[in-house]
Image: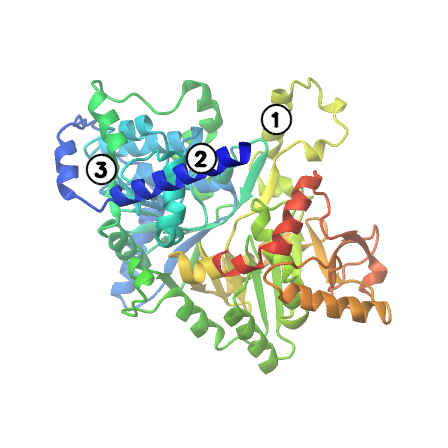
Amino acid sequence: MYGLMCGVKNIILLMAIAIVAGCSSIPERELENAFKYQRLKRSNLEIAKPVESEYHDLADKAWVNMERGGTAEYVSILELGDDALLARVHLIRSAKRSIDIQTFIWKDDPTTRFVFDELVKAAERGVMVRILIDALNMPAEPVVMARMARSHRNLEIALYKPLNETAVVGRIGFWDNVVFKAKKMNRRMHNKLVLVDSRIGIAGGRNYEGRYYDRDTSFLFRDRDVIVAGPSVLDMQDSFELFWQDKHSVFLTQLLDVQLEFEKLTTDCEHFSSTNDLWLFEQVDQQASEPAISALRESIKIYEADNVKFVYDTPRKFKGSKERMDFEEWFEIVFEDAQDRLVIQTPYLIYSRTSRKGFKEIRKKHPKFRIIASSNSLAAADHVHVYALSFKHRKELYKKTGIDIYESKPFPADQKSYVHQHDKIVDHAISLSGIENRSDIENIERVGPKLCIHAKSFVLDGRISLIGSHNFDPRSAKLNTECGVFIEDAEIARDLEAIILNACSPQNSWTVSKRPHTPVVSYFSGFIGGVSTALPVFDIWPYRYTSNYELKEGASPLMPRSPAFQENYIDVGYFPEVPDSSTVIQAQLMKAFGGWANSFM
């Protein structure tokens, strides 16, 4: 009887989904909607001047360089999350005419509320502000989005490619999206940009959530952005305009539940930030109005670079358009002259067959060509299923493709240099736990936030750098749109390479290397493992070609393929420091039965 009831329930659910699919529609851009709700927005203007900024001076200098036939532009790498937040707030305060923000994720939390209040203040002094957010993850509840949409007439917010006419879709709406709108659901805008006055831009990997800006006590992303001041920002602006004007960019007030909440609002919007959260941003608030933030922090360095190129996918990528060169074609051009080494950092090591073939061809042409990859271990990863597919193909990546893999530790020894005011975050975590004294904690280095690599960068041959949103995986290649900044400059390449190699060092990462060879046993295990890995499902062979290794105390670091490697390292297993067995089980199940999903990751 119970089984019959469940079957009937499922049939009813499927019928309901089919009915919803038959009557629901995907909204497209309506300019009339924007005009209708524009008149209801706040229109008061404060008399406020933008702050002075060294980056505006550098942009002026870069344009003069261009007019005189030069190509020099000015660049800063934003390695620390707090630096990235400071730079954003500083540039928002410096804006004179326009601010455009493009992002994959905007999560309603104290950090985004703080940033949004800064954007409203900019709008109040006459700056035109536009925010474009991918609609796969809604930025907030409908009532909050209504408040955001009503914040000021100079501020517009659009969602890219929403799948439903409402922000809240419920269980039936979710399955309607999965079953009937999978193609649109799977193809997303992953680009991240901040543009100020079409003269200064920030591109990179950071979304909008406290975890990207050193504002979480349990989990933080190690990410990377780049500031560019100069003519290359015009290409960034063109990229933003293509997405903003696209028919799939829908104003917030086109969503019916947001529209309903909007019409209920009767008073001017108050600040979005809570006074209880402002202590989190005291230092940023104080420093953001200073004209030279690079003078305040050694971690923000300004470079002069002659060859800066912004590369981006357009919305037409989904239609297979070849009106302009896309990201993948740029990769091919850049790697044509590869000779010595590639140092790469990415959250996930999942490569398409084409990418693996390309690496093999480079190594065939240049046998000593070395590929060094900094990525996440299972203990540090934020997506278990994505890591599992990387782990499934690790033998091919290590042995056939020739990648030296370094998997980051969740609590690296250099965590204090990776996180601004790390001790302050740890103290806050301790206070939240109710522990009164630091001395009562046995492993104080494990109290702070777990760190996860989210940066997407590489350095080729010590001369060409890329910082962007592209994960170098099949999803970034075929499904998402991406963008990034290519820089050909020896000093920037040297410094960025040093940052990534530091992440690969023994105190911060485990080294992936071949497991010890046992005659006969290793041969048959490798053969069965190879057959098992080739299966899209039922990859259940438990033994792997590689393992993770920790440097022995007092021993010297060696390359993972060194004949003496085993003498200096200790095998710590496939999944060191994973805190619970359920995570390992999930990874093993995905490895065993999820190989078919590799092209979607």
User: What distance separates the C-alpha of mark 1 from that of mark 3?
Assistant: 41 Å
- Residue in the picture at 48% in, 57% down: 600
User: What distance separates the C-alpha of mark 2 from that of mark 3?
Assistant: 33 Å
- Residue in the picture at 32% in, 66% down: 320
Q: Quadrant of the N terminus?
A: top right
Instruction: Say which label, 1 or 3, has the lower sequence index.
Output: 3
Q: Which residue is mark 1?
A: 429
Q: Is residue 374 visible to the viewer in this orientation of the structure?
A: no
- Residue in the picture at 50% in, 36% down: 4
Q: Which residue is mark 2?
A: 9
Label 1 element class = helix
Q: Which residue is mark 3?
A: 254
Instruction: Examine the image and state in which quarter residue 9 appears.
Output: top left
Instruction: Say which label, 2 or 3, has the lower sequence index.
Output: 2
Q: Is residue 119 visible to the viewer in this orientation of the structure?
A: yes
CB atoms at circles 1 and 2 under 8 Å apart?
no
Residue type at mark 2: give it. Answer: Lys
Q: Nearer the viewer, mark 1 or mark 2?
A: 2
Question: Closest to the observer: 424 or 13?
Answer: 13
Residue type at mark 1: give it. Answer: Ala
User: What distance separates the C-alpha of mark 1 from that of mark 2?
Assistant: 45 Å
Label 3 element class = helix
